[in-house]
Amino acid sequence: MVNLDKDIQYIKGVGPSRATLLKKLGIYNLGDLITYFPREYEDRGKEKKINELIDGEEALISAFPVGRINEIHIRKNLILYKLIVRDETGTCNITWYNQAYLKNIFKQNTRYKFFGKISKKYGAPEMQSPVYETSENSKNTGKIIPIYPLTYNLSQNIIRKIIENGIKEVEGKLEETLPEYILQNYNLCDYNFAIKQIHFPDNFANFKLAKQRLVFEELFSMQLALLSLKNKYEIRKTGIIFDKSAKMIDIISKLPFKLTKAQLKVLEEIDNDMESKKPMNRLLQGDVGSGKTVVALVSAYKAVKSGYQVAVMAPTAILATQHLETFTELLKGTGIRCELLISGITKKKKEELLQKLKNGEIDILIGTHALLEENVVFNKLGLVVTDEQHRFGVRQRTTIVEKGENPDVLVMTATPIPRTLALILYGDLDISVIDELPPNRKEIKTYAVTKGMEFRVNTFISQNIEEGRQCYVVCPLVEENEEINAKSVMEIYENYKNKIFPNYKVEYLHGKMKQKEKDNIMEKFKNGDIDILISTTVIEVGVNVPNSNIMVIENAERFGLAQLHQLRGRVGRGKYQSYCILKYQGNSEIIRERMKVISSTNNGFIISEKDLKLRGTGEFFGTRQHGIPEFKIANLFEDMGTLKVIQGAVIEVLDKDPLLEKKENILLKKMVDKKFKNRIEI
Ligand code: ADP
Ligand code: MG
């Protein structure tokens, strides 16, 4: 058996200094090396005659040098090396720049292969900076050649050689990683074949087989790991069986509005989970403004009426405070006691609060990260709700959950992601979706504008303020920054307050301010004491000021589509027609396309799907989403179809063998254990 843990340094062709470079690429051992998959391939398979060469294509020729290399000094530091080669059909000019070592390489009467891009000048073919080698020793030409991603100071030739050496060590000796029956059922090639052919495919058909199998394996193992984690959790643990007589309808009927069908459907799912003995682990997805808070509230009501406490965790103090207000208001007359825990409160107040929590004199505790602290001890925690889940990592979710004994968990997010994606990213959670907005919501009218429209935009803002409305302005930066050409909060603030809107009350808000100041400003905005609020994206999540109806976003091109949509969701919360004005700079195709997408729909799911397409998965999940696995070979967007097949496959396996204890699933058990060790934090 091969030792895949073998240090990369000891692979033939590596040594200490190259090992350092390889480690930068995340290649530490033999196993990493053989799974460092090519980014793309060059088809150097078909050899052409010189008289068949076409302008602009990449081609492989086989030819003899005619005379020596010619050295042409074009200007200082730029030397052109030119070699004429010939075959039976004609001659071709080969050129390189600044590669002095080439001068004495080519021998007369020796046949070489050249692969490169052809350009035709006055009908004569020329090949620039080609790859070359002698005909007898052709490694880098004459077949499908892998191109590896990002290789720092390693040339493609070197990394290719190293990987080839690695493959030689393991060839035919790799242990199969998938059970025979899976290979059979899904027509997958075996592992040894796949690894060899993904790097050095003999032909296109083999490459496809190899890729299919490796993508399958990658997604399958991810999904299997997540779902078996869920099984483990559900099977081993007995959760709380909430009271059937604590009826959700009792509070629903007292609400000031009628719940939407979607809200009711989701509540039914939650109700079932709460009454069953397996712990609930549910993700609630719903576009901004779809009314997730009230769903949380109704669930909390049921938990409290069953004799348990509830924790509601929000990412910012502003949001937590707002939730407290909503809860207090809507639960009036039920006798349910709600309190707020954020880091801003006084020590004395906090101690008092913690004591009451411990004694069970608080039913619902709403707060920020402050809830995670060790001294926050519940008397009988039965339900955990986290709002805007993408702000919290898996670990934080676990910390709060452990403050109870297998409490039910409801995770709420307004980041709409395509369902198939949600399944793989949140595979450990059941998913509910609110796919409908409360009635009579007016569509937020969105306009993308450039600098020339400034005056009209300002006039429009004035008109609305005169009618009693309020306006948000969001900027990408807090302060001016010489390096970044984008609007800052302070710059806009000065400009609006002193020049453009001297008669209105203009204030600003950003993340660097003290919590107290922020809360103060938010409070004033809510009470209508501020006309225009200039801020960074700190106002992005959840705040609710129904009287504000304009959202201006400066440098909109700097925000992701999903984020723009989220920001836009701050308006359109009241009875007034609302507007989102996207000011953008730049004229690239992609910027215009993105502005078009966001102006043309209010549906967060459509937007996120387009966003994904325009940006690719890497960036989409880039900065803000944590705990999302990176894939070596699968591309979540391209492989969406495969993903569906795989989800079916995983469910079939786990239905028959939930804890992977059967003999035929030994390999799968191993696969999952390895995944847990490497990636998923529990
Ligand atoms: P989000 O899903 O973005 O968190 P919220 O829960 O903040 O949305 O709800 C947005 C607004 O819609 C709130 O003012 C809330 O009171 C209101 N709302 C929620 N559900 C309904 C409904 N069924 N009918 C009317 N208004 C509703
Ligand atoms: Mg919300």
Image (tube, rainbow, N blue to C red):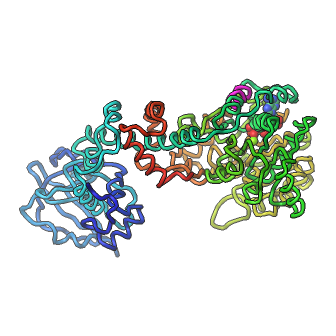
Residue 369 found in image quarter? bottom right
Left or right: where does residue 573 sit relative to residue 651? right
| Residue, far left | 109
Q: Which residues are magenta?
A: 262-270
Left or right: where does residue 389 sit relative to residue 634? right
Q: Relative to 149, is 575 above or below?
A: above
Residue 426 can be seen, yes or no:
no
Q: Quadrant of ligand 1?
A: top right
The residue positioned 76% from the left and 57% from the top of the image is: 370
Where is the N terminus found, in terms of image quarters? bottom left
Residue 151 found in image quarter? bottom left
Residue 137 can be seen, yes or no:
yes
Please state the horizontal and vertical placement of residue 357, each as a whole percent of the image.
Answer: 83, 51
Nearer to the camera, 470 or 279: 279
The residue positioned 89% from the left and 63% from the top of the image is: 348
Left or right: where does residue 496 sit relative to residue 481? right
The majority secondary structure of the magenta stretch comes to helix
Q: Relative to 69, is 92 above or below?
A: above
Q: Relative to 152, is 388 above or below?
A: above
Nearer to the camera, 380 or 162: 380
Please state the horizontal and vertical placement of residue 104, each as a whole percent of the image.
Answer: 16, 72
Q: Is residue 263 magenta?
A: yes
Q: Is residue 167 magenta?
A: no
